């Protein structure tokens, strides 16, 4: 029995549910704030309460993203395209490589689209290729691990500093995406991961007797039921409206026109959660054509967001304890005190990797960290675009060892965090090593 197999068995026995993770992390952060800051226990509880609802809008945006993205991917048109792609490779290895490459590219383009397409592709692979002996949890693990490639055009920090009038413009100025997202240093690093991750997944996937294929009950739950074919003459007037395309297609066309106008006027670089959700909603309406099909798909999609709805406020409370107690500044200044011009981006990477375990929201966390990390970088003479990219690397890397962003994926695949943890830990160790070597040995830019 190999290391991965032993780790899999260990995690199934010892690693608790994601909800237990958030409870444990809450207590750890409470203890750190109590020990390192001047806030007493009652003040820290108030800090927790102050931050508790700070991610409410974000939680709703994520829920809408999951549900509408699910509805888009579950439409007959998209499903047929996914099935055609899935049917091209004939072996388990070729299927996993194809899945990783397509989903990885979409994760880089936009993390929300990448997440949803990877979920839908992985679910279809599990159902349609049951005879190939593919280890079912590896599909969920791939869907999640590819978040390490999500430092492309949709990353919040890079988009924020590229926007005139941003909150720290007096320190950084406006930094265009050509110096961050499209910096050759970052692009080449992403390309290296894009090429090597499929190989790594083929090495670590359990094979033979250790491969756990999808069971019949889960396969049935993931399969989309075929629509009932009822003759029109047997339908009531109300049901005819439910199955009519007229109203929904007209409204969908209006919404998509508004979305295209927004992208034309603002450019793809200005894409955000609201514009994506707006587009996905009306695209899903258009692809499903009639209200009956659309609402049925939305109802199925809501099963993927239960963890997001209940756990986002808990993580927001953790954010409150770290932010309002002053704990974030204490930890950051400790790291800064031991860094130099050459090591500062790496220190930021490590610090962000650690802090992101407790506050796994790259956008809101950047607002907390930037006021003291960016001035410190300038004082040390470090490249600020390089520091921002290092920050992003830390944010995406830490996701491998904590379940926050895995919640919608775990819900969609109907697996537990301990099922994918053996694989995510290996990818985490690989990326920590790769990013550290890159930041320490490869200078910023060429």
Image (spheres, helix red, strand yellow):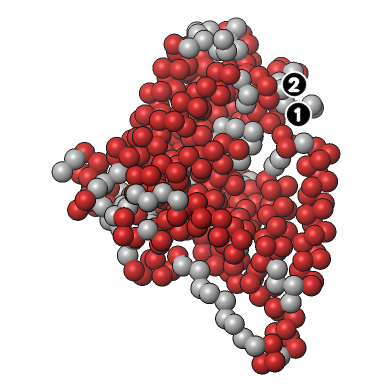
Q: Position of residue 255 (x, y in %)?
A: 79, 57
User: Viewed as shown, does residue 129 lie left or right of 112?
Assistant: left
**Label 2's element?**
loop
Q: Nearer the viewer, residue 37 or 23?
A: 23
Residue 409 in view, yes or no = no
Q: What residue is drawn where x is 72% and y is 34%?
A: 269
Label placed on residue 112: none
Q: Position of residue 428 (x, y in %)?
A: 39, 33
Furthest-bottom residue in view? 234
Q: What residue is drawn where x is 78% and y is 42%?
A: 263
Furthest-left residue in view? 1
**Label 1's element?**
loop
Mark 2 or mark 1, which is nearer the start of the sequence? 1
Q: Which residue is mark 1?
A: 163
Q: Which residue is mark 2?
A: 174
- Please tell me whether residue 329 is drawn above or below residue 257 in the rendered image: above
Q: Are marks 1 and 2 in contact (CB under 8 Å)?
A: yes
- Please tell me whether residue 425 is drawn above or below residue 119 in the rendered image: above
Q: Position of residue 422 (x, y in %)?
A: 31, 43
């Amino acid at each position: 029995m190999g290391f991965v197999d032993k780790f899999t068995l260990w995690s199934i026995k010892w690693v608790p549910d994601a909800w237990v993770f958030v409870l444990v992390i809450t207590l750890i952060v409470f203890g750190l704030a109590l020990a390192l800051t001047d806030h007493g226990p009652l003040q820290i509880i108030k800090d927790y309460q102050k931050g508790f609802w700070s991610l409410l809008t974000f939680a709703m945006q994520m829920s809408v993203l999951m549900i509408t993205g699910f509805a888009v991917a579950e439409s007959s048109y998209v499903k047929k395209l996914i099935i055609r792609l899935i049917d091209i490779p004939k072996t388990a290895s070729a299927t996993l490589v194809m899945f990783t490459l397509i989903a990885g590219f979409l994760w880089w383009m936009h993390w929300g689209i990448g997440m949803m397409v990877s979920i839908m592709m992985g679910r279809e692979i599990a159902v349609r290729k049951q005879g190939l002996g593919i280890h079912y949890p590896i599909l969920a693990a791939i869907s999640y691990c590819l978040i390490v490639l999500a430092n492309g055009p949709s990353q919040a920090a890079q988009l924020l500093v590229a926007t005139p009038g941003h909150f720290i413009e007096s320190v950084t100025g406006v930094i265009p995406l050509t110096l961050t997202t499209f910096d050759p240093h970052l692009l080449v690093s992403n390309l290296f991961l894009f090429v090597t991750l499929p190989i790594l997944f083929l090495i670590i996937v359990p094979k033979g007797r250790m491969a756990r294929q999808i069971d019949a009950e889960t396969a049935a739950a993931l399969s989309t039921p075929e629509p009932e074919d009822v003759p029109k003459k047997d339908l009531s007037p109300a049901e005819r409206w439910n199955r009519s395309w007229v109203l929904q297609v007209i409204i969908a066309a209006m919404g998509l026109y508004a979305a295209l106008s927004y992208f034309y006027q603002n450019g793809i670089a200005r894409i955000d959660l609201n514009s994506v959700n707006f587009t996905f909603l009306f695209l899903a309406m258009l692809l499903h054509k009639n209200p009956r099909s659309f609402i049925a798909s939305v109802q199925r999609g809501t099963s993927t967001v239960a963890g997001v709805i209940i756990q986002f406020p808990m993580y927001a409370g953790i954010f409150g304890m770290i932010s309002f107690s002053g704990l974030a500044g204490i930890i950051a200044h400790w790291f800064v005190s031991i860094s130099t011009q050459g090591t500062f981006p790496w220190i930021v990477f490590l610090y962000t990797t650690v802090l992101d375990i407790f506050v796994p929201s790259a956008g809101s966390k950047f607002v907390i960290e930037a006021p003291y990390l960016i001035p410190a970088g300038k004082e040390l003479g470090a490249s600020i675009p390089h520091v921002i990219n290092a920050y992003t690397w830390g944010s995406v890397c830490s996701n491998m060892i904590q379940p926050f962003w895995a919640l919608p994926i775990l819900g969609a695949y109907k697996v537990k965090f301990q099922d994918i943890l053996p694989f995510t830990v290996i990818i985490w160790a690989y990326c920590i090593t790769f990013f550290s070597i890159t930041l320490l040995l490869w200078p910023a830019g060429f």
